[in-house]
Image (cartoon, rainbow, N blue to C red):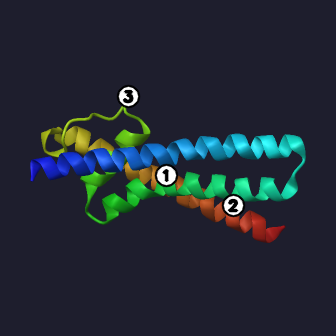
Amino acid sequence: MDDYQGRLFREIATLSKNIFLSFFVSAICSLLSQLLGIKWLLTIFGILFLLVFFVSWITPGVFVILWRPWLAHAWLYGINPIMISSKPWTQLSDFAKTGICAQSLIMASFASVGLIMTITNTIAK
């Protein structure tokens, strides 16, 4: 069981790291398309940028809500391996576990509010 959890931790961390890096790639591509004046490409990369950003920030909160905080731990470790411990979930202190859950829910809350504000701002135009 420990080997499975370790492999799952690495896979989730790698997935979140790749999604987070694609966030930066889409941001650079949308800036380049804006500089080049290509409107349709700007629209595509802008939508991709927002989608990747919201998925990257909402996912840890969804894991916590679904009672899978160890997956949120792996996701956050993939995004920020400097601040989040690579220890297995069972070896973390209660304070660290609470911090990971709180960080996940706060990130998901801000991303959800941002998504709602983006949608209402777009509709209001």
Residue 70 visible, this orientation: yes
Residue type at the position of mark 2: Thr
First in sequence, mark 1 or 2: give its number. Answer: 1
Lower position in the chain sequence, tag 1 or tag 3: 1
Q: For mark 2, does the 10 Å Cα neighbourhood hold few (<14), some (14 to 19), or many (20 or more) residues? A: few
Callout in the foreground (1, 2):
1
Q: Residue at x 26, y 47 (%)?
A: 9
| x then y, percent, for residue 120 | 71, 68
Disc 3 element: loop
Is the Cβ of the residue at disc 3 closer than 8 Å to that at disc 2?
A: no
Q: Amino acid under label 3?
A: Ile
- Where residue 116 appears, as percent x and y from the top left, is 62, 65
The answer to which of marks 3 and 2 sits earlier in the sequence is 3
Disc 1 to disc 3, C-alpha distance: 17 Å
Q: Which residue is depicted at the point 18% across and 50% down?
A: 5
Q: Position of residue 29 (x, y in %)?
A: 72, 44
Q: How many marks?
A: 3
* Residue at 28% in and 34% down: 85
State the image coordinates of residue 37 (x, y, percent, origin top left): 90, 47
Q: What residue do we see at 29% from left, 44% from top? A: 10
Helix, strand or loop at label 1? It is helix
Read off the residue under disc 2. 118
**Side of 17 relative to 54 (left or right):** left
Q: Which residue is mark 1?
A: 57
